[in-house]
Image: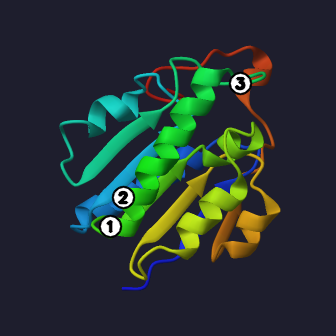
């Protein structure tokens, strides 16, 4: 099977959720998935479900216990670069059919590493490896390199009514 590059980006909700749904579908079809989460270190509900329960999905986080909202700190940069290096090795090994770079667009946006670093990984991947990229602010170079790009656009969101994130829905 030929692997493609998919991007889920935009200001709307659902980018990580789309990637998780794809990972779950792939696991159900007997495919091996590596799910790397950049700038995330919290134990989200999906982490609790996947780790130890779905052996064909490996999930790793490359972030601290808080999401970056301002200038990154040295630890944010170190974790992201270490994660990218690990994922480069995983992609090139070709043992996973699908490799998800969750929130990698945010890592690039905050200059934790350069877009060209990710493009090198994408271009050097084995032909069967499907790459999934998520996060707001997808770099135009990534969009150009992708085979499928979906933009999630917020039309209306209950956050605007001061509804806090809910366990099992947003985290």
Q: Which residue, given by chain and number where applicable, does mark 3 sit on?
A: 72
Image-based side of 70 in relation to 147, left or right? right
Q: In the rendered image of this protein, does residue 147 appear above or below residue 69?
A: below
Q: Which residue, given by chain and number where applicable, does mark 2 sit on?
A: 90
Label for residue 124?
A: none
Q: Measuring from the top left, give residue 60's x and y in whole percent.
A: 38, 39
Q: Measuring from the top left, give residue 167's x and y in whole percent.
A: 46, 20
141 or 116: which is nearer to us?
Answer: 116
Q: Is residue 132 visible?
A: yes
Image-based side of 7 in relation to 33, left or right? right
The structure residue drawn at horizontal position 54% and vertical position 45%, both measured from the top left corner, is: 16
Nearer-N-terminus badge (3/1): 3
Q: Evaluate if marks 2 and 3 touch, with contact meaning CB atoms under 8 Å apart.
A: no
Image-based side of 89 in relation to 137, left or right? left
The structure residue drawn at horizontal position 52% and vertical position 21%, both measured from the top left corner, is: 64
97 or 157: which is nearer to us?
Answer: 97
Q: Measuring from the top left, give residue 88's x and y in whole percent.
A: 46, 58
Nearer-N-terminus badge (2/3): 3
Q: Is residue 20 visible?
A: no
Q: Evaluate if marks 2 and 1 touch, with contact meaning CB atoms under 8 Å apart.
A: yes
Q: Evaluate if marks 3 and 1 touch, with contact meaning CB atoms under 8 Å apart.
A: no
166 or 82: which is nearer to us?
Answer: 82
Q: Measuring from the top left, give residue 26's x and y in whole percent.
A: 32, 64
Label for residue 93?
A: 1
Q: Quadrant of residue 71?
A: top right
């Amino acid at each position: 099977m030929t692997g493609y590059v998919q991007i889920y980006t935009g200001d709307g909700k659902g980018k990580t959720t789309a990637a998780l749904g794809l990972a779950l579908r792939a696991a159900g079809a007997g495919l091996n998935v590596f799910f790397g989460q950049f700038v995330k270190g919290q134990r989200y509900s999906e982490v609790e479900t996947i780790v130890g329960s779905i052996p064909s999905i490996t999930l790793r986080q490359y972030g601290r216990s808080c999401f970056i909202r301002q200038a990154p700190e040295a630890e944010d940069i170190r974790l992201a670069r270490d994660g990218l290096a690990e994922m480069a090795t995983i992609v090139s090994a070709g043992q996973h059919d699908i490799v998800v770079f969750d929130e990698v667009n945010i890592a690039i946006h905050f200059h934790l590493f350069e877009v060209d670093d990710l493009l090198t990984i994408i271009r050097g991947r084995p032909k069967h490896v499907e790459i999934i990229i998520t996060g707001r602010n997808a770099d135009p170079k990534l969009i150009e390199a992708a085979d499928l790009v979906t933009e999630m656009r917020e039309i209306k969101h209950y956050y605007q009514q001061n509804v806090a994130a809910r366990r099992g829905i947003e985290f």
